[in-house]
Image (cartoon, rainbow, N blue to C red):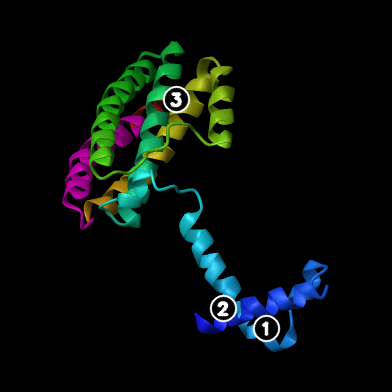
């Protein structure tokens, strides 16, 4: 800290004689190490402060980064399953329509449980989709008939395959509540995957 203060005084003195008239003149050769140290400290402070305020409850999270990342990923996935399931109600294929209704029911329930878990652990979950995902969903709203059914079911097979891997990883979490939630959801998600695969084979 003494070295940093001395450096600050040197900079002030240099500026007073117009040695700091441009940003390029800030780097004095003899003080390059101190400058690097100062930049490093500033970067660390910026990293800690970016996107957070004293009122941000994520600073008080009881779970580590892996569990928080899982909850946020699961929340986005669950939201998408519900919204796409609602869009898919326009399908005239009874299998697709029934599957979509099941997605809305099961994932709405799971989303509510996840939200309660996140609030308990003071994790803020996303409430909006990334722009790319939203654009994709808007595009699907304009699709009709068999083209929509195939696109929707193919997406459900791919998404649930990835979701199973995500929840298997979370099932091994050191956080008991997160692990139990993932273990409870795995059979349901696996069931969705198997149903989607069966419908997919009929649509080919």
Mark 1 vs mark 3, foreground winner is: 1
Q: Which residue is mark 3?
A: 203
Q: Can the viewer see residue 201 in this picture?
A: no
- Element under disc 3: helix
- Element under disc 1: helix
Occupied quadrant, residue 103: top left
Q: Residues within 10 Å of mark 1 (few under 14, many from 20)?
A: few
Q: Which residue is mark 1?
A: 32
Front-lying residue, 7 or 104: 7
Give the CA separation, mark 1 to mark 2.
Answer: 15 Å
Question: Which numbered disc, 1 or 2, marks the residue that appears first in the sequence?
Answer: 2
Task: Please tell me whether the stretch drawn in magenta is mainly helix, strand or loop.
Answer: helix
Q: Residues within 10 Å of mark 2 (few under 14, many from 20)?
A: few
Question: Which numbered disc, 3 or 2, marks the residue that appears first in the sequence?
Answer: 2
Horizontal arrangement in the rendering, residue 150 relative to residue 67 (left or right) = right
Mark 3 vs mark 2, foreground winner is: 2
Tell me where residue 60 appears, x and y as whole percent: 30, 50
Occupied quadrant, residue 164: top left
Q: Residues within 10 Å of mark 3 (few under 14, many from 20)?
A: some
Q: Is residue 165 located in the magenta-colored stretch of the structure?
A: no
Region in magenta: 173-197
Tell me where residue 196 appears, x and y as whole percent: 35, 31
- Element under disc 2: helix
Q: Height in image: 179 above or below 144?
A: below
């Amino acid at each position: 800290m003494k070295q940093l203060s001395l450096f600050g005084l040197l900079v002030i003195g240099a500026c007073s004689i117009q040695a700091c008239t441009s940003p390029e003149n800030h780097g004095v050769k003899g003080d390059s190490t101190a400058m690097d140290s100062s930049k490093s400290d500033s970067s660390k402070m910026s990293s800690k402060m970016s996107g957070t305020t004293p009122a941000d409850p994520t600073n008080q999270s009881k779970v580590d980064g892996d569990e928080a990342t899982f909850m946020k990923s699961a929340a986005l996935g669950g939201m998408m399953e519900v919204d796409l399931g609602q869009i898919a109600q326009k399908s005239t294929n009874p299998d697709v329509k029934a599957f979509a209704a099941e997605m809305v029911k099961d994932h709405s329930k799971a989303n509510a449980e996840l939200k309660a878990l996140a609030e308990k652990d003071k994790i803020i979950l996303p409430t909006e989709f990334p722009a790319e995902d939203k654009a994709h969903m808007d595009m699907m709203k304009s699709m009709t008939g068999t083209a929509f059914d195939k696109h929707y079911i193919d997406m459900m097979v791919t998404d649930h395959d990835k979701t199973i891997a995500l929840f298997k990883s979370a099932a091994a979490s050191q956080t008991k509540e997160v692990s139990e939630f993932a273990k409870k959801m795995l059979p349901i998600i696996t069931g969705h995957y198997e149903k989607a695969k069966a419908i997919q084979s009929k649509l080919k």
